[in-house]
Image: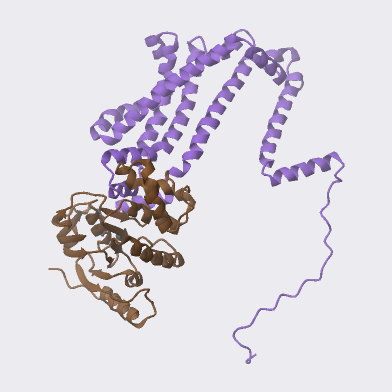
Chain colours: A brown, B purple
Amino acid sequence: MKLRISHIEKTYSTNETGRRLRIINDLSLEIEGSELVCLVGPSGCGKSTLLRLIAGLEQPDSGDIQVDGQPIDGPHADRGMIFQDYALFPWRSVQKNVEFGLEIRGVPARDRGGVTAKLIHMVGLAGFENRFPHQLSGGMRQRVAIARALAADPKVILMDEPFASLDSQVRKQMQHELLRILQEARKTIVFVTHSVEEAVYLGDRVVVLTGRPARIKADYRLDLPRPRDPLDERFIAFRRLVLGLLERPDPVAG
Amino acid sequence: MLDQTPFTTAEPAPKAPATPTLPPRVWPIGSPVGALTVIWQRASRNGEARFIRSLLSVIGFTLFWQLASNTGVFGIFPVDAMNLFLPSPLTVARTFKELFTQSQYLSHILTSLYRVMFGFSLAAVIGVTAGVLIVSSKVAEDILQPFIRLLQPIPGVAWVPLAIVWFGLGDRAAIFIITVGALWPTLLATIQGLREVDHNLVNAALTLGATRRQIFEKVTVPSIVPHLVTGFRLSMGFGWRAVLAAEMVGVSSGLGYMLTLGRGVGRTDITLATMVSIGCIMLITDAFIFGTLDRKTSNWRPKREERRKANDEIAN
Ligand SMILES: Nc1ncnc2c1ncn2[C@@H]1O[C@H](COP(=O)(O)OP(=O)(O)OP(=O)(O)O)[C@@H](O)[C@H]1O
Ligand SMILES: [Mg+2]
């Protein structure tokens, strides 16, 4: 798998002045193989916009995004997305939510069970197949969303602050689970987060973005052994480094 | 004081001198009041108390009515006139029984039912179709909007004279009036439902590989179902109102006709028995059909705060 973002630019028109607001400015990024890439950046810098562009939910003004050499046009099952507020279908049970991608692809009902059972087990929801989203806790809902994304068998999974609305206890647990699930599923993940600690805990790579318009400020590869210890010296040093980058004013865009 | 450590375990508060508490005063179980108290307490525990309260209220009202009817509203009116002005519940119940053995009465019920179902179905089809058109096309919206604005405030009853001129005194006039009367709630619910489809769910479906058509089938349609249940429910009520009005004014059959018939021949008991039937029929359709559907689909709606959040995100 190879995701290649080259020189993309994105602007939005602001309704008051009609002036166009530049959100992403000449951003290029390459992601290869099954790695977990964390994106951090100041609030409002365009992280979600970047994910939506990769997902194909929006188009860049210029530049292009390729998956395995194919330029993307619009959303596709090869780029799954996990949303902060889960976006589960409230009228579908856990089982039916997870099945969605298979159903869409026309897999006959009797052949879906095997795949979904495995995934539901993997995210630790065995026994909850017939529950509905409103009967689940936030953490459980996010697990369903993860299983649902995996069931569609995407090449890349895009996660937009997936754990932000969970309390810190559940959040820790979910980070742990995510790593465990990924070890089994081996997928490429682009993970947006507000939290530097989360990025350093999870990431194989940590990409720091500048304030709006977003460009890449730094791109680190992290080879801290797992499971990572947030009190480990190198962990703390790295966290401090990224935090410093976020606080330092950006060089003025040319 | 200085040698005290910052951490101390709190001493348990000294107990207040124990005063012997009297057992709550209860009526002896054997007495009627005592028995009732026990029944009441048990019912409260089982959550039946509220039902019993409502039941008692209905029984009390019926007794009061019976008494008022028997005494000429406590001596204000001559007792003889009560058969016309206020037949007693017993009389009404007897009439009810009598009516139910007459095929004529049953056929009036069926006639009204048939009209409401027919008119309601038409209204549902037209309302949903027009709603879909309006939301999916600006042109359609501009063309239809003025008529909706203008016609929607007109109650179904107001269409009666025109309907009689157009369709004569029969089923077709009644069905027309029901359709026009019942159209609006369904139409408005469809429009609102379609506008409130959660953007996030559409995006989720897109990133799972859904086509436009699949999004319509698997996201849009289920999203608007709860709205439709509410819309249909209101439409059905409007339909009943319209059919009764039509039958009272011109179309000489159905339950509305029975209401006026009772008055015309001085049989107020027939009118009252008919009113009770109408109430029962409407209650049964509403509670059993729509109530059940509503409970089944209530969790399909995004919670209000989640919807607000989603809208905020779009607005940002
Ligand atoms: N559809 C839109 N129309 C106009 N402006 C938009 C639109 N979507 C986003 N923006 C603007 O683009 C900027 C970046 O938004 P984006 O949601 O990508 O930021 P973000 O980095 O994800 O922020 P946060 O950290 O708060 O999630 C914001 O200033 C936002 O107001
Ligand atoms: Mg965001």
Q: Which residue is drawn at 24% across and 54% down?
A: A55
Quarter occupied by the C terminus of chain B: bottom left
User: Which of A190/A77 is in front?
Assistant: A77
Quarter occupied by the N terminus of chain B: bottom right
Q: Residue at x 44, y 50 (%)?
A: A133
Image location of residue B247, percent across then percent down: 50, 14
Residue B36 appears left or right of B131: right
**Quarter of the image where one finds residue A200:** bottom left
Query: Can residue B93 be seen here?
Result: yes
User: Which of B225/A128 is in front?
Assistant: A128
**Ligand 1 quadrant?**
bottom left
Image location of residue B226, percent across then percent down: 43, 38
Image location of residue A201, percent across then percent down: 35, 72
Residue A129 appears left or right of B203: right
Q: Which residue is drawn at 30% across and 40% down?
A: B214
- Examine the rendered structure and indicate whether residue A148 appears above or below residue A107: below
- Examine the rendered structure and indicate whether residue B205 appears above or below residue B233: below
